[in-house]
Image (cartoon, rainbow, N blue to C red):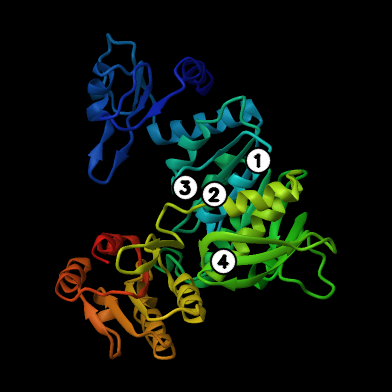
Amino acid sequence: MEISSLYHIFRQYPVITTDSRHCLPKSLFFALKGANFNGNAFAKSALEQGCAYAIVDEEEYCDAQDKRFILVDDVLKTLQRLANYHRRQLGTRIIGITGTNGKTTTKELIAHVLMKKYRVLYTQGNLNNHIGVPLTLLRLTAEDEIAVIEMGASHPGDIRELVNIVEPDYGIITNVGKAHLEGFGSFEGVIKTKGELYDYLRTKPKSIVFLHNDNKYLNEIADGLATIRYGSPQAGAILNACGEVVECAPYLHFHWRQGNSMWHEVTTHLIGSYNMDNMLAAVTIGLYFGVSSQQIDAALADYVPTNNRSQLEDTANNHLIIDAYNANPTSMTAALKNFQAMKVTPKMAILGDMKELGTHSAEEHQKIVDMLDECTFDKVWLVGSEFGATRHSQRTFDNADEVIAALKAEASQGYYILIKGSNSMKLSAIVPYL
């Protein structure tokens, strides 16, 4: 089927589902495949539950007499092509965002700022891969004035694939750091892959990049791009917005200004001085799109994280700094430096393994442990086999279940506790016991 013909059907039935357990009436079912499932096998069930059509790519699952089956060569590619076709039909202004750390928080902050003036569609959660991105684009409506689309990567070429679907008009790379080294092969591979966003924008007339001026790696790959810059105050630097941390006690309190105008002070609901750059990115983009300074301040002050990222939670016993969604050497180092600088006591750190580091894993975990020797934390618990294999004098646990058992036996009280680790370590499960 031609993509234009499928698009005509989509316009009549604009709700997409890829899970036969969640089929809304008159939706379109795309029979995607995974390592352990074949969506084609559930196409008939999806139709029985009320889907208007089922898009499949294996003929054996089709009923030739039932016109509700649409056979294509590749369901995933068809979903991606449909999303790109829809994006082109609407012509919505799109900001593409990627980066090693902070892209989800920055995306949320940008969206909250822009929503003060515009109707904004933005990536929900972390639906930032080859499936999540097209599903997000297909939620666009004619009423949406701006879209903020997050794009993630774990292998070379991932961002190139996504930008060709999204075709962003604007781009921002939050930063580049040591993450997914197993897939990228090296830090240089990370930079090259994230830079695929810049590569695309070079080919698009009138595109603009929002650039963190303090980041030398981003500056090195930004040649030939129209840039609007933000960063810390520097003599001679031409910045759209600059800002500085005032304090973290424990929430980030910062001030910013445009050019030589007055300083704006904002107290946020985010933990960590490392969120300064994320805030400033949202300020810069808000200013570019004509959001007033007062509206920007209000949006940043009102934003409350709910995704286990830089989140402070007070329990009956402790004060928790929950950053357990993801971890890599760059973000782990930043979190520990911030925790060390916080003027609170007593302090406890519960750290889980950093995944997908490949042959660099042992070295990077040892660097974190060595850094801990310089920190003045009252307690440190390390969770996982990678940390367990390092040279250290800290208390270790194989997994979150062992941590929970220890907490039941010896409850911690009155501590400020940093919880940081890769999502697969399931450290969020220990929160109810703290």
Which quadrant holds the C terminus? Answer: bottom left
User: Label 1 amino acid?
Assistant: Lys
Residue under label 2, please give it: 108
**Do tag 4 and tag 3 residues touch (Cβ < 8 Å)?**
no
User: Label 2 amino acid?
Assistant: Glu
| Residue at mark 4 to residue at mark 2: CA–CA distance | 16 Å
| Residue at mark 2 to residue at mark 3: CA–CA distance | 13 Å
Answer with mark 3 or mark 1, whichever residue precedes in sequence: 1
> Few, some or many C-alpha atoms within 10 Å of disc 1 (few <14, some 14-19, many ≥20)?
some
Element type at marker 2? helix
Element type at marker 1? loop
In this rendered view, identify the residue nearer to me: 434 or 242.
Answer: 434
In this rendered view, identify the residue nearer to me: 393 or 175.
Answer: 393
Between circles 4 and 2, the one closer to the viewer is 4
Q: Looking at the picture, does residue 129 appear above or below residue 378? A: above
User: Label 3 amino acid?
Assistant: Asn
Element type at marker 3? loop
